[in-house]
Amino acid sequence: MAPPSYSDLGKQARDIFGKGYHFGLWKLDCKSKTSSGIEFSTSGHSNTESGKVFGSLETKYKVSDYGLTLTEKWNTDNTLFTEVAVQDKLLEGLKLAFEGSFAPQSGNKSGKFKVGYGHDNVKIDSDMNVDLSGPLVNASAVLGYEGWLAGYQTAFDSQNTKLTTNNFALGYATKDFVLHTAVNNGEEFSGSIFQKCNDNLDIGVQLSWASGSNNTKFGLGAKFQLDKDAALRAKVNNACQVGLGYQQKLRDGITLYLSTLVDGKNFNAGGHKIGVALELEA
């Protein structure tokens, strides 16, 4: 099995702090799949503070015989997105894709070529935007050996002929434990730990420090599975912000999420946030 992409390093700990929380939102997600294999995903949310409503519709169709995946997406900002991808046809583990977006109102359009390759001990990803004046090239590679992971990510601005990103990562992963450390542009240092204590309890720790501002962030998070249909989530950071979440499977294909964010430093002043999300799948 190939190592994860650079962007997925430390994902298990990030999910502890992000997944299942919808602070300040009323959210609805719907997923469905037709008998012909076309997948439909619709999502919408309303921000309780600004009142702004945002929604999107996505369709995905896979042609398995040719390893082809067609994805189209539209959102309420009136932006159209299309991606065509081919997987494992030219070479096992190789994925080629082209994605483009178009905003009819403004006329803004963009395109990007993407290449990904995964093998037993290496995962390589690269993309290049379509810009005749000089494309921006992003590239990353992750090497894995007996649980150890080492990654590098860079971005090259061909128009100005300079590197704009220079990131390093090192980690160790097993089935129940993941350690991740990273250095971004030599200025931001971060680390995370994920531990699956048992079948019901997952915990995570995050730490980051920025040399420019000397700003340190620290957080603890946990997810506890009450039973096969319900789960509790909790997290706290060094700014005394406490997040709580509850997940309940109402029936097959229907899951409800309740969450709240409490500002411990200004508890009496209010300003705390709540969130409600409903997921439907058929």
Image (cartoon, rainbow, N blue to C red):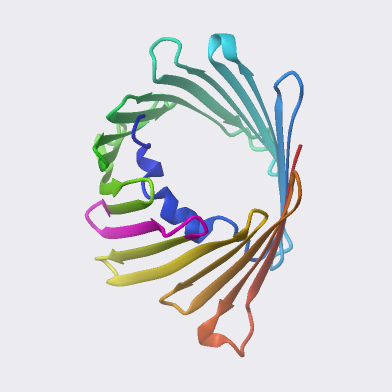
Depth order, front residue of 178/75: 178
Q: Give the residue drawn at x 28%, y 59%.
A: 188
Depth order, front residue of 187/181: 181
Could one spot residue 43 in this view of the protein? yes
Depth order, front residue of 196/46: 196
Q: Is residue 198 above or below residue 82?
A: below
Question: Magenta-highlighted stretch: main secondary structure?
Answer: strand
Q: Is residue 250 above or below residue 85?
A: below
> Percent from the top left, x then y, of residue 114?
43, 25
Q: Give the residue drawn at x 38%, y 64%.
A: 205
> Percent from the top left, x then y, of residue 183?
25, 53
Give residue 219's quadrant in the image. bottom left
Could one spot residue 53 in this view of the protein? no
Q: Give the residue drawn at x 49%, y 54%.
A: 15
Q: Give the residue drawn at x 32%, y 29%.
A: 124
User: Farthest residue toward the bottom?
Assistant: 268
> Percent from the top left, x then y, of residue 146?
24, 38
Depth order, front residue of 95/232: 232
Task: Write the start and end of the magenta stretch as one range.
Answer: 182-201
